[in-house]
Amino acid sequence: MIGVGKSGIFVLDSNGRISETISNESFISNSNGCVISKNQLCISQLDKAKLVFLANNQLFRASVPEIMTSLDFSSEGELLFCGSKSGKLYVWQVRLGNLLFCEQIFYNEITDVKIDCNNSKLLLSSSNGDICLVDLLALFSNKLVLKNYLGHTSHVLSVCNLLYGIHGGRVSFLSVSRDRNLRFWHHDNVNTVLSKQLSSNPIKMYKDKYSICCYITCEDGNLITVNLNDFSVNYSKLHGGPIYSFVELDNFITFGIDGVKIWDKSNHTLLKYHQSGISLNHLFGGQLPNSSFKFKLLKFHKQEDDLERYIVPLSM
């Protein structure tokens, strides 16, 4: 596993212990400000307008126009989608550093950015409760096509993009807000399909490997499992305080103020526990990206020919 947070960047073994220290530098980002692809890890620093990239045990810092509050990669890691504090959406072609797109989407902070499994629709949420879907086919044809969804009345913390998944015909995406409101949406309907009020304060939502369910980490140590078959919600008490990060591998791995815990997926029985003494905000499964990726400075201004030369990486 890879751990990122205030204490640095670490490789953790199967017991949750540190097996390698990549950096002891503090990397503070919000819950949606760190992502990984097969080529690189990317962290958006909250205290400065910089993105930090990690590949092949090398760190590279790229200045960006403003603080980025949410990140996501396309499935192959070719595109980096960034939502900003001012409500702008930036899209970079990371390999060349080209800025392909920059537009104002909201007039509040973009709190989360999630692309679907086909790389065709981008789901965005904002700090005032707005949610919208961006058509990437249209975007890369120089047209901005947005569909806005109405329902939340407070800060949306996290979204889960389920478009083209096995439940795509019933529910297209989920969102959860600061006022404990969980909403289920279908992309054809601008209004909520279903709304549930949670009993725990949510932090972040995660999609499972097979899009069968979603998981929500909470401030009181609960992990909420949202079943996408019947939309039921189940609570499991895993930590004595906030669950800062969660990753699904063969088992569940969670990180809280009391350390790293490894759980049996089927019954949430505690298998291993390690009081690490470090502070992490993000966990990722697998090894560090070890590619021949060459870092490029990110351009601040869009060049028209960049977009014209770009081949849209869609798998529809």
Image: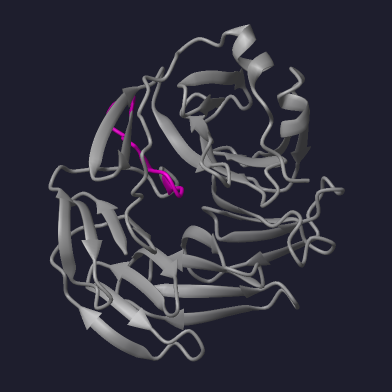
- Toward the front, the furthest residue is 292
- Looking at the image, is 313 positioned above or below residue 224? above
Q: Position of residue 217 (x, y in %)?
A: 45, 66
Would residue 310 be found to the left or right of residue 257 on screen? right
Query: Could you tell me which residue is drawn at 47 percent across and 39 percent down?
Result: 70
Q: Position of residue 275 (x, y in %)?
A: 17, 75
Q: Which is more toward the observer, 15 or 189?
A: 15
Please count the marks in the image: 0
Examine the structure image and report whether residue 48 is included in the region drawn in magenta: yes
Examine the structure image and report whether residue 178 is included in the region drawn in magenta: no
Type of colouring: one colour
Would residue 78 be found to the left or right of residue 172 on screen? left
Choose top left, top right, bottom left or bottom right for residue 148: top right
Query: Could you tell me which residue is drawn at 46 percent across and 48 percent down?
Result: 37
Q: Which is more toward the observer, 159 or 297?
A: 297
Q: Provide the residue span drawn in magenta.
A: 35-50
Would residue 177 be found to the left or right of residue 278 on screen? right
Query: Could you tell me which residue is drawn at 72 percent across and 25 percent down?
Result: 139
Q: Quadrant of the N terminus?
A: bottom left
Choose top left, top right, bottom left or bottom right for residue 212: bottom right
Q: Position of residue 96 (x, y in %)?
A: 47, 22
Q: Position of residue 10 (x, y in %)?
A: 21, 56
Query: Could you tell me which residue is drawn at 66 percent across and 48 percent down?
Result: 152
